[in-house]
Amino acid sequence: MKWMINASFAVHPDFKSHTGGTLSFGGGAAQVMSKKQKLNSRSSMEAELIAVDNVVTMMLWTKLFMEWQGYPIDKNILYQDNKSAILLEENGRKSVGKRSRAINICYFFITDQVEKGNVKIKYCPTDDMITDFMTKPLQGEKFRKFRDLILGPQE
């Protein structure tokens, strides 16, 4: 399972960020989500952490659901384009700096899941982050590229 999770920082009139997520099994998107975050964040890195927290329960539930249907899931991969957020998610408190000390401990739930082997986090370049389709107004070639990836192969 390949999950792409992204956030657009402070894009709403009340300066809250926006979360986007997609699940793919290879071709097209099997599950998508796009929603306004309930918390205000102080940086794009915090917005990314909140986005992961918004989607991680869906990631874990989907993995369990697929396994109960008889499809063993060896790799449950989370792709992100923010390297600071990836460091925090993989290392937890060991990566906390001066600007991120106040981040609520609940956002390190993902660190526990990484340590347990339920989720693996990988970097995805911003230009390949399909979830931009759910978080940003895209135009032209980038819009068509991501639309086609989400809808899957067309005849």
Image: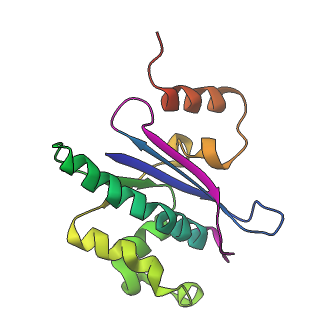
**Residue drawn at point x = 51 percent, y = 65 percent:** 54
Is residue 94 rendered to the left or right of residue 128?
left
Residue 78: say if magenta: no
In percent of width and height, residue 40 lies at 69, 75
> Do we see residue 108 in this rendering?
yes
Residue 26: say if magenta: yes
The majority secondary structure of the magenta stretch comes to loop
Q: Which residues are magenta?
A: 25-44
Q: Residue furthest top?
A: 155
**Residue drawn at point x = 42 percent, y = 44 percent:** 23
**Across the whole image, how many numbered discs are drawn on residues?**
0
Looking at the image, residue 86 lies above or below residue 39: above
Q: Residue furthest front?
A: 69
Is residue 24 rendered to the left or right of residue 17?
left
Identify the colour scheme used.
rainbow
Is residue 72 rendered to the left or right of residue 113?
left
In percent of width and height, residue 60 lies at 33, 60
